[in-house]
């Protein structure tokens, strides 16, 4: 009796994908009039294998044959592996075969493999919708509060550095519920804007709105950091807590409001700014590069 095939399992988190096994290098792309045409072709082909984090299209170096190469990043290593196997040495959208290989990468301090940056709120929603469905989760704001006057030495130092401006600082606490799994988690986001023109009420209102919006977006992203998606090869998805749960998930709403009122939470840990990876941080196998144009 033949042994059953091993179950394929992938863990997908709400962070910028950093693994080599999630990034494909696509070369031997023939010249076209516009890069946008190449982007559309690449996106159409590879999005069939799963949700993409990013697609980047670049012209070949001057020393190489005219044409393009692309960097395709998946959230899922399983999807990236399938895409590489099924597209390498296939013509697909042109008359000559593409060369599709896994990337190698030099990790910089901006994007660390050991400490990947969180996805922004838009990417978090896109990822949740793809794996959980549009009706598989929902969010609500528990608190959105002005904390412009809160804090200590850090805020005082900023005020001394910008005597003409007014700091507008908001904190948001948001709850995300995963309807089909009976789970919920909370996130905290802090955002600050500096109003340099204190005499313009319209400018102040715009800065106020931007601070509130950014705080809610960061809170949503922070909440998703506490969840891992366990994706099986057959497409089934389950949820698991990550290691990033904190005390806000244990408080009742009333206790959270009290914490806000007495300023008993350290805001600085929630003020991180996400950074996107830089294309120059990517490197590729020399064997792959040598295949361009052949």
Image (spheres, rainbow, N blue to C red):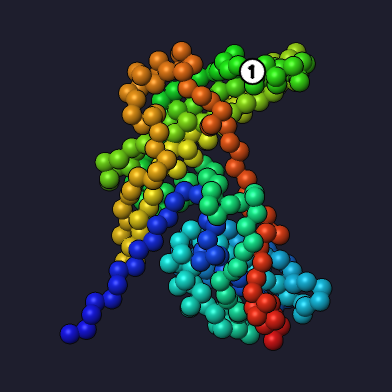
Task: Tell me what residue is drawn at x 64 percent, y 18 percent.
Answer: 153
Is residue 289 found left or right of 183 in the rendered image? right
Q: Is residue 70 above or below residue 258?
A: below
The secondary element bearing badge 1 is classed as helix
Q: Find disc 1 in the rendering and name its residue.
A: 153
* Image quadrant where residue 93 sits: bottom right
Task: Tell me what residue is drawn at x 39 percent, y 45 percent.
Answer: 242
For the image, the number of numbered tags is 1
- Point out the residue furthest to the left here: 1
Tell me residue 223's x, y (percent).
43, 38
Q: Is residue 169 above or below residue 270?
A: above
Q: Is residue 135 visible?
A: no
Tell me residue 258's x, y (percent).
40, 15
**244 or 43, which lies in front?**
244
* Quarter of the figure with the N terminus: bottom left
Crowding around mark 1 (Cα neighbors within 10 Å: few <14, some 14 to 19, many 20+) is few
Q: Is residue 160 above or below residue 32?
A: above
Tell me residue 92's x, y (percent).
56, 79
Q: Is residue 111 above or below residue 43?
A: above
Task: Tell me what residue is drawn at x 33 percent, y 42 percent.
Answer: 178
Tell me residue 72's x, y (percent).
58, 65
* Quarter of the figure with the C terminus: bottom right
Task: Tell me what residue is drawn at x 47 percent, y 38 percent.
Answer: 222
Q: Is residue 167 visible?
A: yes
**104 or 90, which lies in front?**
104
* Image quadrant where residue 53 sits: bottom right
């Amino acid at each position: 009796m033949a042994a059953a095939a091993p179950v394929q399992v992938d863990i997908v988190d709400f962070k910028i994908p950093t693994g080599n096994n999630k990034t494909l290098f696509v070369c031997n792309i023939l010249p076209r009039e516009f890069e946008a045409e190449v982007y559309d072709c690449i996106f159409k082909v590879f999005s069939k294998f799963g949700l993409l984090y990013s697609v980047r299209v670049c012209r070949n170096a001057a020393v190489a044959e005219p044409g393009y190469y692309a960097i395709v990043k998946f959230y899922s290593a399983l999807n990236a592996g399938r895409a590489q196997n099924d597209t390498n040495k296939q013509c697909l959208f042109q008359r000559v075969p593409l060369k599709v290989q896994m990337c190698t990468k030099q990790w910089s301090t901006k994007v660390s493999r050991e400490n990947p940056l969180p996805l922004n709120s838009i990417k978090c929603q896109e990822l949740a919708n793809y794996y959980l469905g549009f009706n598989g989760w929902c969010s609500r704001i528990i608190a959105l509060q002005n904390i412009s006057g809160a804090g200590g030495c850090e805020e005082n130092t900023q005020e001394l550095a910008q005597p003409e401006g007014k700091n507008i600082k908001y904190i948001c606490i948001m709850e995300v519920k995963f309807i089909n799994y009976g789970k919920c988690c909370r996130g905290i986001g802090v955002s600050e804007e500096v109003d340099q023109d204190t005499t313009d009420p319209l400018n102040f209102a715009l800065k106020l709105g931007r601070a509130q919006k950014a705080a809610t977006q960061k809170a949503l992203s922070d909440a998703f950091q506490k969840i891992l998606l366990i994706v099986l090869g057959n497409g089934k998805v389950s949820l698991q807590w990550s290691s990033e749960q904190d005390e806000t998930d244990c408080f009742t709403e009333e206790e959270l409001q009290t914490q806000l009122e007495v300023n008993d939470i350290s805001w600085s840990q929630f003020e991180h700014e996400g950074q996107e990876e830089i294309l120059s941080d990517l490197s590729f196998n020399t064997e792959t590069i040598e295949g361009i144009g052949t």
